[in-house]
Amino acid sequence: MEMPGLLDIFPLWTILPLAVGVALLSIEFGYRLERYQRKHLGEEKEAPAPVTGMVGAMLALLALIQAFTFSYAASRFEDRRQVMLSEATAVGTTYLRTSMLPEPMRTESRNLLREYVDVRLEAVQPAKLSQAMSKSEELHNRLWAQAVAAAEKERTPMTSLYITSLNEVIVLHARRVTAAVRSRVPAAMWMVLFLLAFICMAMMGYQLGLNNSRRSLAAVALVIGFSSVLFLIADLDRPGQGTLEVSQQAMIDLRKSMN
């Protein structure tokens, strides 16, 4: 079962406009806070120089946390790609080694491996993920039963090579499930990123109030840039849902070679 992420309650396409909207509201909040303070407590005596330095420091910290989160999500994406390639290679090797099995295990095992590749290709669709995972485990049991039957019928070094390859396929399946659906950006990282973003945008709005500049194209550009990177992180963190997806071409080519 897929591990839910903190932002999974929102459709992916809404992340960018939501991030832009929340950031702009945070800037407005900071601006109004400065207006309120100016009206009731008076203007800051040493403004805006100290505030400008603090805003710069907070923006640098936000950029650091955002870069760290992006790197984390990108590394999970690369893990999914590498595991998929390794699994395709392992299944292909196992398929070739079925020729070492006696009949009828040879034909039955090849048919099961073809079905297994079809199931793995279906697993990239979120709607079919749970069903595909259950079917994969069922096929593992059937393939292993075939391998045991072949070993009992004719125990040879060639049969042992096939069993070794099949074992690697099963191990890589577990790794792929972990990388694809159970390794997500932790909720704590999202919350720290959001908290820092709110504080930074509010401080920017406060600084704009000190400078009597309510609307600034630079602030809007910063908001759009921050929101775009946040959208990319969310996209990388949602396998099978976004625009940044691991290519399944290796599995597709393997399935064609099995015909």
Image: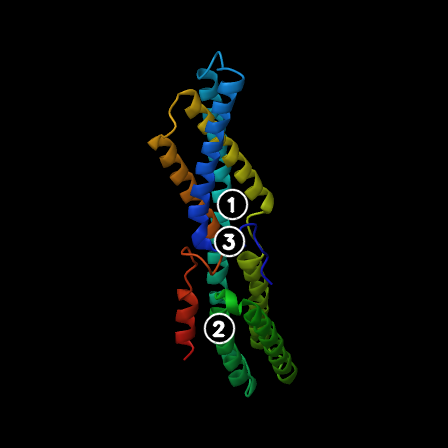
- Pointer 1 residue: 72
Q: Is residue 192 above or below residue 75?
A: above
Position of residue 152 in the picture relative to residue 22 (left or right): right
Question: Which label belongs to residue 134?
Answer: none
Q: Name which quarter of the figure residue 166 lies in.
A: bottom right
Q: Residues within 10 Å of mark 1 (few under 14, many from 20)?
A: some
Considering depth in this image, is 240 or 150 the residue closer to the camera? 240
Q: Quadrant of the N terminus?
A: bottom right
Position of residue 258 in the picture relative to residue 148 (left or right): left
Position of residue 24 in the picture relative to residue 144 (left or right): left
Q: Residues within 10 Å of mark 3 (few under 14, many from 20)?
A: few
Residue furthest to the left in view is 217
Secondary structure, mark 2, is helix
- Pointer 2 residue: 117
Q: Which tag is nearer the camera, tag 2 or tag 1?
A: 1
Residue 132: image location, x then y, percent: 54, 71
Residue at x 59%, y 46% (from the top left corner): 187
- Answer with mark 2 or mark 1, whichever residue precedes in sequence: 1
Amino acid marked by disc 1? Tyr
C-alpha separation, residue under disc 2 versus residue under disc 1: 29 Å
Residue at x 42%, y 71% (from the top left corner): 254
Amino acid marked by disc 3? Phe
- Answer with mark 1 or mark 3, whichever residue precedes in sequence: 3
Q: Quadrant of the C terminus?
A: bottom left
Q: Is residue 208 above or below residue 100?
A: above
Considering depth in this image, is 217 or 3 the residue closer to the camera? 217
Residue 14: image location, x then y, percent: 44, 52
Residue at x 51%, y 85% (from the top left corner): 107
- Pointer 3 residue: 10
- Answer with mark 2 or mark 3, whichever residue precedes in sequence: 3
